[in-house]
Amino acid sequence: MKITRTIDYELIAQLNKPILELHASLYPQH
């Protein structure tokens, strides 16, 4: 099941990237 975990990890990373960028734009101090 390592393949499934890798895919899930990459998918989560891709979904989190825009959220992190949005958070950074909202809170530039941090």
Image (cartoon, rainbow, N blue to C red):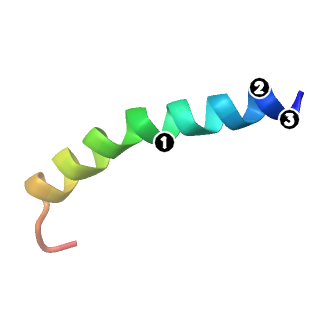
Residue that label 3 marks: 2
Question: In the figure, is residue 12 to the left or right of 16?
Answer: right
Label 1 or label 2, whichever comes before in sequence order: 2
Label 1 or label 3, whichever comes before in sequence order: 3
| Crowding near the residue tagged with mark 3, few <14, some 14–19, many ≥20 C-alpha atoms within 10 Å | few
> Could you tell me which secondary element the residue under label 3 belongs to?
helix
**Pointers 1 and 2 in contact (CB under 8 A)?**
no
**Pointers 2 and 3 in contact (CB under 8 A)?**
yes
Image quadrant where one finds the N terminus: top right
Residue that label 1 marks: 13
Using the numbered discs, state the Cα–Cα distance from disc 1 to disc 2 in whole angstroms: 14 Å
Residue that label 2 marks: 4
Asked which quadrant contains residue 25, the reply is bottom left
Residue 5 versus residue 22: which sits nearer the camera?
5
Using the numbered discs, state the Cα–Cα distance from disc 1 to disc 3 in whole angstroms: 16 Å
Residue extending farthest to the bottom is: 29
Residue 8 versus residue 29: which sits nearer the camera?
8
- Number of labelled discs? 3
Image quadrant where one finds the C terminus: bottom left
Rendered residue at 76%/33% (across/down):
5
| Crowding near the residue tagged with mark 1, few <14, some 14–19, many ≥20 C-alpha atoms within 10 Å | few
Kind of residue indicated by mark 3: Lys
Kind of residue indicated by mark 2: Thr
Across and down, in percent, residue 10 comes to: 56, 38
Question: In the figure, is residue 4 to the left or right of 21?
Answer: right
Q: Please, is residue 21 above or below residue 9 in the view?
A: below
Residue 22 versus residue 8: which sits nearer the camera?
8
